[in-house]
Image (cartoon, helix red, strand yellow):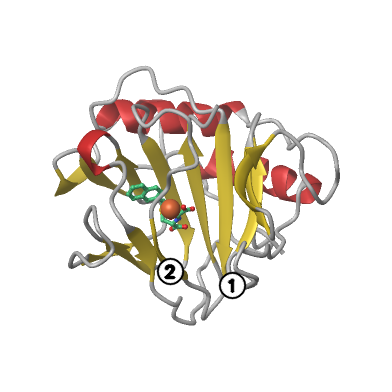
């Protein structure tokens, strides 16, 4: 169940003007920002679209080129989806499970990503890929760099939903010391420029239940991949 259907609806707590409110911004690096609670005014419109995307392209556990099954469940929407199998990591226009194109990126996803990028100082962000990661309790992502995108000038925007996680933010080399950053429901992080190729990962998810998402964390990562 991607989004908890028993969850209380957002009873119109946010006015349209709240979409313009400045987020509480934390500095992670020269060109990396955490926008705390940035997506709170968006989730009411976003979560139903997320359910539709996941109905068309359900989470699946993919295999790494090294032969390990990832603990994180993956899906995508947009023109390009990130995939991995025994042959390697790549972006593909076709969902390897359905053999059909990935679901289109909902307009509200694209708008959220563009607004968040702008709030962090990156104008005209136009993502063509949204990778959707699902963490159940115990799932983790080992320290890695994101280097499958063609153009490292565009930033990456990530939206956390559901259970909290500890994000690891390292340096340009795997051996560099990493900082631990808690990421909570509706936090958005933007990385670009000199911070774009820094190592990062996620510690094993602690068990718990989120009122809207249940027993999981879902992370949406927006990129310009093509
Ligand atoms: C930091 N996802 O999908 S947020 C990934 O929470 C990934 O699911 C994590 O790392 C998650 O590749 C972390 C996304 C993220 C993406 C790109 C980055 C963080 C980054 C590039 C540089 C530094
Ligand atoms: Fe990554």
| Residue displayed at 50% across by 28% down | 127
Relative to residue 210, is residue 194 drawn left or right? left
**Residue at x 34%, y 27% (from the top left corner):** 153
Residue 86 drawn at (x, y percent):
69, 60
Q: Nearer the viewer, residue 207 or 10?
A: 207
- Residue annotated with mark 1: 71
Q: Quadrant of the N terminus?
A: bottom right
Return the disc, 1 or 2, that comes first in the chain's sequence. Answer: 1
**Mark 1 or 2: the one toward you:** 2
Is residue 49 shown left or right of residue 109?
Answer: right
Circle 2 sits in a helix, a strand or a loop, which is it? Answer: strand
Q: Is residue 77 visible?
A: yes
Q: In the figure, is residue 10 to the left or right of 119? A: right
Which residue is under mark 2?
142
**Extreme residue in the top direction:** 124
Nearer the observer, 159 or 200: 200
């Amino acid at each position: 169940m991607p989004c908890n259907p028993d969850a209380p609806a957002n009873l119109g707590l946010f006015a349209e003007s709240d979409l313009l409110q400045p987020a509480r911004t934390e500095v992670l690096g020269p060109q990396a920002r955490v926008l705390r609670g940035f997506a709170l005014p968006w989730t009411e419109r976003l979560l139903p679209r997320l359910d539709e995307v996941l109905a068309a392209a359900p989470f699946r556990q993919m295999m790494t080129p090294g032969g390990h099954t990832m603990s994180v469940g993956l899906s995508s929407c947009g023109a390009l989806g990130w995939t991995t199998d025994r042959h390697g990591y790549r972006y593909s226009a076709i969902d390897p499970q359905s053999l059909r194109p990935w679901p289109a990126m909902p307009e509200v996803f694209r708008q959220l990503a563009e607004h968040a990028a702008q709030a962090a100082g990156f104008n005209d962000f136009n993502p063509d890929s949204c990778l959707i990661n699902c963490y159940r309790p115990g799932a983790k992502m080992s320290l890695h760099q994101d280097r499958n995108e063609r153009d490292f000038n565009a930033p990456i925007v990530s939206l956390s939903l559901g259970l909290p996680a500890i994000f690891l933010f390292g340096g340009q080399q795997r051996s560099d010391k990493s900082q631990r950053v808690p990421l909570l429901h509706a936090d958005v992080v933007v990385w670009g420029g000199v911070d774009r190729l820094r190592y990062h990962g996620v510690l094993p998810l602690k068990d718990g239940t989120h009122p809207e998402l249940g027993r999981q964390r879902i992370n949406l990562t927006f990129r310009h991949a093509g």
